Image (cartoon, rainbow, N blue to C red):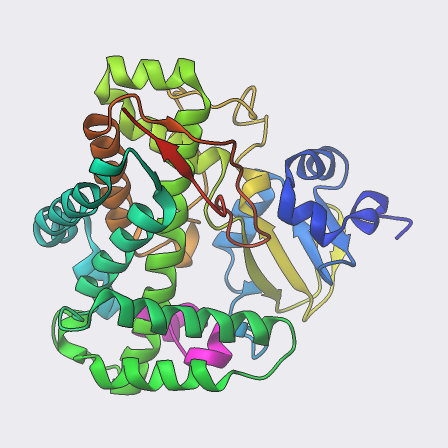
Amino acid sequence: MNAFPIGASATVDELEADPHPLLARLRAHEPVSWLPALDAWLVTRRDLALQAMRDAETFTVDDPRFSTGRVVGPSMLTRDGDEHARHRDPFARPFRLDAVRERFTAVVAEETERLIDAIEPHGRAELRRSVAGPLAVAATATALGLDSADSAQVLGWYDAIVDSVTGVAAGRPTTRAGDEAFAELRAAIEPSLVTGGPSSLTPDEIVSNAGVLLFGGIETTEGMIANAVLHLLSNADQLALVRADRDLLPNAIEESLRLEPAAAVIDRYATRDVELGGAPIRRGDLVTLSIAGANRDPATFPDPDRFDVRRENAKLHLAFAQGPHVCIGMHLARLEAHSAVARLLERLPNLRLAEPAAPRGLVFRKPPELNALWD
């Protein structure tokens, strides 16, 4: 506590509400700091976060404490080295950029139009639950070959699995509802549809990875869309630039990902005693990498707290991580965000916030509600 006084005074409430002032102080003075509130080392400097992401031999996900693994079993999210490749490789082809564009462009466009059709006549809506979330559910269901399952059923599985993972992370056992949801998901999955063909994975391993894709595909994409809309509607000058030049929209979404990544932190476990940024990390220690902190590192991003749709290096953000665990679904997530944000701006005249909103959350950050009006 004497060596890391800023980290020692940090609270979970501070990290959930608005962590950025704290992350800035940590990055400047304690770039790798021990936070008793998290019982973990927190890495906030971009170069150090990158170093840890790229070194899976020293900073691994392969640890029995990893909460998602305890709920859904072994998967690409909870394995490193050859086992990670064995789990990830069968899914790589269906999520490549060309494959995503071919399979999902029409699906995402049609679902976006359907969702906006439903809200347009009313002149107001809560956009996270009426557009961002349902679009993420529909695209994820298609990716998993769950076209026959309705969105409410898929969302029910997702909610139950998320609740179970959250409980395990807090030291509680898996929930009965979570176990039942995972069993229903297992029964609904057709392995060859998920992987795009034969693979060396067992049916249970394919379902475990499907559970990971279900969780990541809904949670982070919903947040990505909601945060992008929030940033644009909260910054009139930047919104005006995008309205005047729609070619700026893709970079605006990258800038939103930089400013407020939907997944604010990722966890690793030290496999050996190691020094990182001057901190004496011990074997077995939990090392939490702050993507939110790294994405506002002024050494890479001048004026880092400003939302700037013309920022030339916005794509250097780490919102999709890097290294062997770079997000497999990033191309699909971008496709959904581009479609949703573009059509909301085009179809809803004078789209604006009905009330102030701000992202919240320790791990996954998005506005609890995003109430909007239009003419």
Where's the C terminus, which quadrant?
top left
* Nearer to the camera, 165 or 367: 367
Q: Position of residue 1 (x, y in %)?
A: 88, 53
Q: Does the magenta stretch include residue 139?
A: no
* Nearer to the camera, 12 or 298: 12
Q: Where is residue 99 in the image (x, y as percent from the top left)?
A: 12, 53
Q: Which residue is drawn at 35% across and 74% down?
A: 157
Magenta-drawn stretch, dominant element (helix, strand or loop): helix
The magenta segment is 68-88
Report the side of 267 relative to 332 (left or right). right
* Nearer to the camera, 17 or 196: 17
Q: Where is residue 259 in the image (x, y as percent from the top left)?
A: 49, 33
Q: Residue at x 49, y 32 (%)?
A: 355
Q: Which residue is drawn at 62% across and 69% down?
A: 271
Report the side of 311 relative to 217 (left or right). right
Location of residue 171 (image quadrant): bottom right
Q: Where 271 sits versus 262, above or below?
A: below
Q: Where 131 sits versus 123, above or below?
A: below
The answer to whether any part of residue 80 appears in the image is no
